[in-house]
Structure formats: structure tokens, C-alpha cells
Amino acid sequence: MLVFSPDAHVKWFNLKGWESHESQALLPFRGNEGWYYFEVEDACCKRVDSIWVEAVEFASSSSDLSSCVGQDATLEGFGGIRQFWKLPNGDLYEGKKLEITNTTAQNEGNYIFHALDENGCEDTVQVFLQIITPEVPQIQVGNTCLGDTVIFFY
């Protein structure tokens, strides 16, 4: 809590040119990390204090993943008190662990894990899920005669 004379002049500012002359100042958090200075001046004296503001990353997740078509894939995120996943198609899934059963090519893409902390701050991590679709083998066999050697390839 800040206590100072009612006739004091107050100013919040940073070295990027932003300033506010209110005792409480609000800025969007993202993109405004760095040093902030608080200055109070009255008829007697001038005081300056500073605070470092930074975004602390608290979300993490499993690494990018590859899965063959038809297999199951599990993506897991960590951090925060509330979590959800944003799927490549835009759908949202609540929870830390996302289990995809019987994967198809449509499951491939970027999955974004969102974690919210106790202050409502959000951190995100992206995971890419690659779905591998094996090629269908094409057997090519020419005309054969009894006793020939047959070589199979695709």
C-alpha cells in the first residue's frame, strides 16, 4: 500500500516512454515486461522506486509426437491450476491430458496447451502431432514361368 501526502504528485513510467500520473496504473501485461519506476514528489522531497515486471513461463507439455494411423496418441500438459487444449480444428478440450484414440490423418496438426495460474494469467505451449500414413504396397510381378525367380518389391 502506498501512503503519501494528498497534494503529492505521483508518476509511474518506464524507459519506453510510457507514463501515468495516477497512483494506480494499468497496462496490458503481454509485451510490457521490463523495469517500471514510481516517483512521488511533494513540497518536501522526491522519492523514486522501481520494480521489475516479467512474464514467468509456467506451462510445459510433452514433446512433438509422431503416431501411425490407427494408433492412440496422448498429449499431456503441465502447470497452472486450470488447463485446456485447443485442437487444430479449433475445438477446445478441458484438462491436462488429451488422449486421441484410433488416430486418422485429420488428427495431424498443432495442439496448443493453455494453462492458467491462480492470478488468471495464461501461458501456452504448442505441440505438433504428426500422423504417419504408411504407403499401400504395390506388388508388381511380370510374366513368370515355372522355375523363374520372382522378386517382390514396392
Image: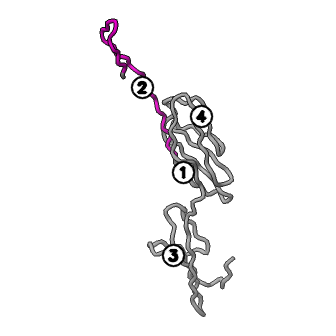
Tell me which residue sits at (48%, 71%) in the image.
Answer: 18
Alpha-carbon distance for marks 1 and 2? Answer: 32 Å
At label 4, the amino acid type is Ile
Among all residues in the image, which is located at the extreme bottom?
44
Q: Residues under labels 4 and 2: Cα distance?
A: 22 Å
- Which residue is the site of mark 1? 125
Distance between mark 2 and mark 3 Cα atoms: 61 Å
Indicate left or right for 21 with 117 as reference.
left
Q: Nearer the N terminus, badge 2 or badge 3?
A: 3
- Give the labeled residue for mark 2: 135
Q: Amino acid at mark 1?
A: Val
Judging by the rendered image, the residue that carries numbered circle 4 is 100
**Mark 4 falls on what kind of element?**
strand
Q: Residue at x 51, y 75 (%)?
A: 13
First in sequence: mark 1 or mark 2? 1
Residue 16: give x, y in percent of width and height.
Answer: 44, 72
For marks 1 and 4, the one nearer the N-term is 4
The magenta segment is 127-152
Q: Nearer the viewer, mark 4 or mark 2?
A: 2
